[in-house]
Image (cartoon, grey):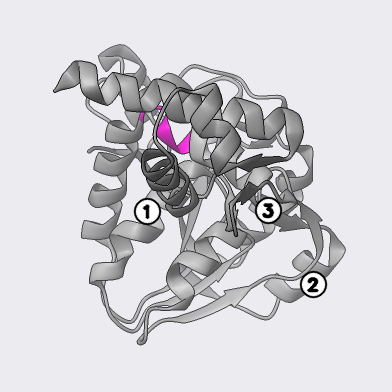
Amino acid sequence: MASEELKIDARRNKIIEILNKKGHVRVSQLSKDLNTSMVTIRSDLNALERDGYLERIQGGAIQTAFHHYNRELLAKKKHMAAEKKRIANALADLIEDGDTLIMNSGTTTYYAAVALKDHKNLNIVTNSLAIAVELGACPTFKVILLGGEINAQHSFTYGNDVLEQLKRYKAKYAILSIDGVCVDEGVSTIHAEEVMVARMMMERSNDTIIIADHSKLGKEGFMYVCDLQDINKLITDKKADPERVKEIREANVQVILG
């Protein structure tokens, strides 16, 4: 069974590779190139469309800008997915029905959004396109997507318009996915455009919760966001270095291991 799954993955990866080069694929040609039945190719294309890698058209599939960037997001979501899901579940346990949350973009906050679906009557303010789409269909949720300039590659909005809109809202928690947490260097991110957005989200919230897998602890990102003492809670996974966890706790930050 494992070898069969590998065979399927290898074939679908090849389809994605061809799609990336040509921008489109045909069922008939893929059947010849991959020495596989057209029924199997159609099944592959349907599965890849469900996963966000392409858009099906009659006789084949095409790559669109949305699916190209969505593909990058999907790839990032797979990195440490198990740890991120445990972190997301630990966060969801802290949230109560009716809470108002401000969330930034990132794969860990995306998993957090999915975990929050078990709640009711949440108010979500976010600059993440992926989170807005994921939670927008929840009937009891009120989801506000902050409008501004778009970073299409990483699916978030930023800029002065986002900052001005954030001033209208007050939340119980700011939930931030970041790229580095250091005792000495503080909290940091690789996205310069998100620095001011993250700071405003913190300012407009009663508490700040950082959600980050163990690989982010002790790591310094490209852009400084805030001092460690400016956050209230850190949720990470149980693979986190005990010494780094101890240092963070000694900085008066509550650390939760998911």
Which residue matches tag 1? 112
Q: Nearer the viewer, mark 3 or mark 2?
A: 3
Figure quadrant of the C terminus: top left
In the foreground, 3 or 133:
3
Residue 164: assigned label: 2
In the foreground, 5 or 109:
5
Element under label 3? helix
Residue 30 in the figure: left or right of residue 10: right
Figure quadrant of the N terminus: top left
Which residue matches tag 3? 66
Element under label 1? helix
Q: Residue at x 37, y 53 (%)?
A: 112
Report, in whole angstroms, how far the alpha carbon at label 1 lies from the one at label 2.
25 Å
Q: Which residues are magenta?
A: 76-80
Query: Which callout, 1 or 2, points at the residue further toward the start of the chain?
Result: 1
Is 55 situated above or below 14? below
